[in-house]
Amino acid sequence: MNYSQIQFSDRKSKIDLYQLQQLLNISAFWAKGRSIEDLGVAIANSDPVVSIWNGQQLIGFARATSDCIYRATIWDVVIHPDYRGNGLGSKLVETVLSHPRLQRVERVYLMTTSQQQFYEKIGFQKNSTTTMVLYSDQLSVITEQNCLITDY
């Protein structure tokens, strides 16, 4: 692989949503079928957003959300299958973690289905005590029943 062509970027404006959709479809079973519109919303509400490029081709992507002091979560870490095994995934996660918005954060979370060992090599630890989930169908029921805020 010619690494002189590989570039990292933290500019959201550089993201080609169609290339991102394609990358997620071929590289991540958990992200197949995401719409262009939803990807745009996710990127707009994430910071940092880090992408990896080989020339004009998007080959890696990750994003984070954070309050910049207590908690952050890393999302959607993906490397194109043709570029795996060369350390780009580790470098991608480390680039996200080194972003100024995450420098003071006490805890960084991420979710993974089958890549625990990969993240453990970077320094993440398994955490089975605090992870819970509320799915959107249940959230809409709760919202309809208990919405007290009228000032949106």
Image (cartoon, rainbow, N blue to C red):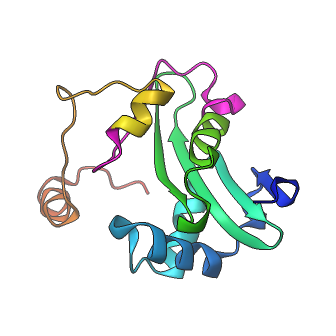
Is residue 100 covered in magenta? yes
Q: Give the magenta part as a residue range.
A: 97-116
Q: As displayed, is residue 74 above or below residue 19?
A: above
The quarter of the picture where the N terminus appears is: bottom right
The residue lying toward the viewer, choosing from 77 and 63, is 77
Counting the numbered discs, the total is: 0
Up the image or down, 20 lies above or below 64; here it is: below
- Give the residue drawn at x 71%, y 29%: 100
Q: Nearer the viewer, residue 91 or 130?
A: 91
State which quadrant residue 48 falls in.
top right
Q: Residue at x 83, y 69 (%)?
A: 55
Place of residue 20 in the rendered image (x, y in percent of width and height, measured from the top left): 59, 72
Please give the name of the residue rendered at 25% of the width and 27% of the height, measured from the top-left corner.
Answer: 127
> Is residue 52 on the magenta stretch?
no
Which quadrant is home to the C terminus? Answer: bottom left
Quarter of the figure with residue 120: top left
Q: Position of residue 6 (x, y in %)?
A: 80, 57
Residue 103: x and y in percent read: 64, 22
Task: Please tell me which residue lies in front, 70 or 120.
Answer: 120
Q: Residue furthest right?
A: 4
**Where is residue 131, by image quadrant?**
top left
